[in-house]
Each structure stands twice: as C-alpha cells, then as structure tokens.
Image (cartoon, rainbow, N blue to C red):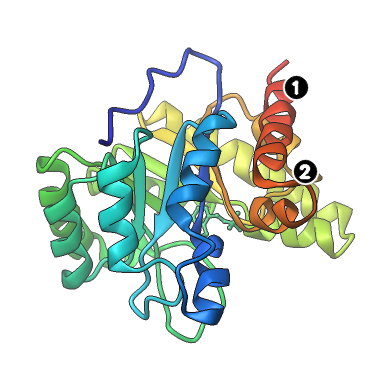
Amino acid sequence: MVSAMPAGEKGRLRLGVNIDHVATVRNARGGPYPDPVRAARVAEAAGADGITAHLREDRRHITDEDIDALMADLRLPLNLEMAATEEMQAIALRHRPHAVCIVPERREERTTEGGLDVAREEKRLAGFIAPLREAGSRVSIFIAADRRQVEAAHRIGAPVIELHTGAYCEAHLAGDQRERDAELARLAEMAAHAESLGLEVHAGHGLSYDTVKPIAAIPQLMELNIGHFLIGEAIYVGLDAAIRRMRALMDEARG
Ligand code: PXP
C-alpha cells in the first residue's frame, strides 16, 4: 500500500526515482520484463524516498496496469506525472496517489521538453488541480525557472512546484559553462522566490552524477526526481548501486 511521504528531516533532500524507462525497455519487446514494480522495490531498498512514473497519453512507457500494480504493491509514495487532460484527471482521482505532478505533453516530443505554461492557462489549471487536491493528492506543477510561471503556479493554488533542470543539464553536456552557470543561477533564484511565496520546491529532468550536486546544494529544494540517467547507469552497475551513488552525491552537496 502507498503510505504518506516519509517526514523527511529538515535539510534532507528527498530522492524520487523515476522508473519510466524500465518500462521503455520492457515495451521494446512487449513482454513482462524488466518489471517497473521490481525496479521500484529495488529503489526503495536503495534509499529512494518515492517513486515517480509518467503515464503518457500514448502509453509509450508506463501503462495503466503499471499504475494499478504500483498503487497496490508499493510502500513508497507514488508521484504520478501526467498531462492536464480529463482522461488523466479521472485516472488520478480513481487512484488518489500520494502526489500528482502536472507536466506539459506533446506526442511528438521525445521527453518532457519544457515546463508547463501555467501563466497562459491559469484559470483552466486552477480548476483542473482543485479536485485533485480535494482528493488528497499533493499537486505539483512542472515549470521552467521563470518568475511568471512561479507566480502563476502560486496563484492557481498549487502547493508545490518542480523546476525543470533540463536546460541546465543540456548546457553542461554542450560544455557551455557560462550558460550552465546562468541556468543554475536562475534555478537558485526561482527556488528562493517560490519558497518565499510559501511553495514547496522540487527539481528534476536530465540530472546525472555530474550535474546533481550544484542542484542538490540549492537549500530551498525538498525533492529531486531522477530517472533516465539512473536507469541507464543501472546497465553497468545495477540499479541499487546507481541510486546509492546518486543519494550519496545529494547528501554530500547538502554537507
Ligand atoms: N521530473 C519531471 C516532471 C519529469 O517529467 C521527468 C521526466 O519524466 C523527470 C523529473 C525525470 O527526468 P529524467 O528521466 O531526465 O531524470
């Protein structure tokens, strides 16, 4: 059964492990393995604080059956990532996961390429998240580190935002130190601003061993959600070791 998110001592950054790409590998052959639920159990044993899964409109990785199984079998809290559609809202209201993270979604994208434009559809999103909150799910909104978006997320009544770290990670991969530093500064500034508004702040997307520490060092962050790199690294060292190393880097960054 899914329990409440562990109380997370002040200062300890929570790690949510995103298991989408275990399902991607499984779906490449259409059989039962590798099983994302088993990955979630390994993640729990390795010290993850939560499991994140993105049920996409096209079900390219996580499926409805995976969500059923995760809700039934997991002891860790589930963070269900989903687009702001009626279909997804009905699924979330049926399951009432610990957390729901609203993300933008376009079929043609390879991954979640940017943050949600909350400022453009404030009214609709306010109405969309209200029943999810009433159902007891902690709602977060995945946005870029942009003041307009942070303030719009606050206005619609979201208690949590997740800042998109993709641009920072891409600048790192491109070797563009100046852009990497600029993105990092934006993320730090918006984390502080969001906290000053009373929002809980999370971050994620594209993080790796090489990029996690400066993000984990941002003191306002309460949770990081990391998936693709960990599942890839698991090919070489195993999922347990990959998660433990990521956890250790996060703890080092927090001193
Ligand atoms: N957070 C959110 C909101 C996401 O959409 C994703 C990707 O599904 C992640 C975190 C994890 O990103 P990655 O798989 O690149 O670590």
Q: Is mark 1 within 8 Å of ligand 1?
A: no
Residue at point 41%, 63% (across, down):
116
Residue 82: horizontal and vertical position, in percent? 33, 62
Residue at point 13%, 54% (across, down):
93
Q: Give the class, few, some or many, for how many residues have Cα within 10 Å of label 1's Cα (few <14, many ≥20).
A: few
Which of the 4 image quadrants contains residue 125?
bottom left
Residue at point 53%, 44% (across, down):
17
Instruction: Please tell me whether residue 209 is drawn above or below residue 34 in the rendered image.
Output: above
Residue 56: horizontal and vertical position, in percent? 37, 71
Please state which of residues 210 and 77 is positioned toward the viewer in this rendering. Answer: 77
Which of the 4 image quadrants contains residue 244?
top right
Amino acid found under the numbered disc labelled 1? Glu
Q: Is the Cβ of the residue at disc 1 closer than 8 Å to that at disc 2?
A: no
Residue at point 59%, 32% (across, down):
46
Q: Pick whichever of labels 1 and 2 is earlier in the sequence.
A: 2
Residue 22: horizontal and vertical position, in percent? 55, 61
The residue indicated by pointer 2 is 209
Location of the N terminus (image quadrant): top left
What secondary structure is marked by label 2? loop
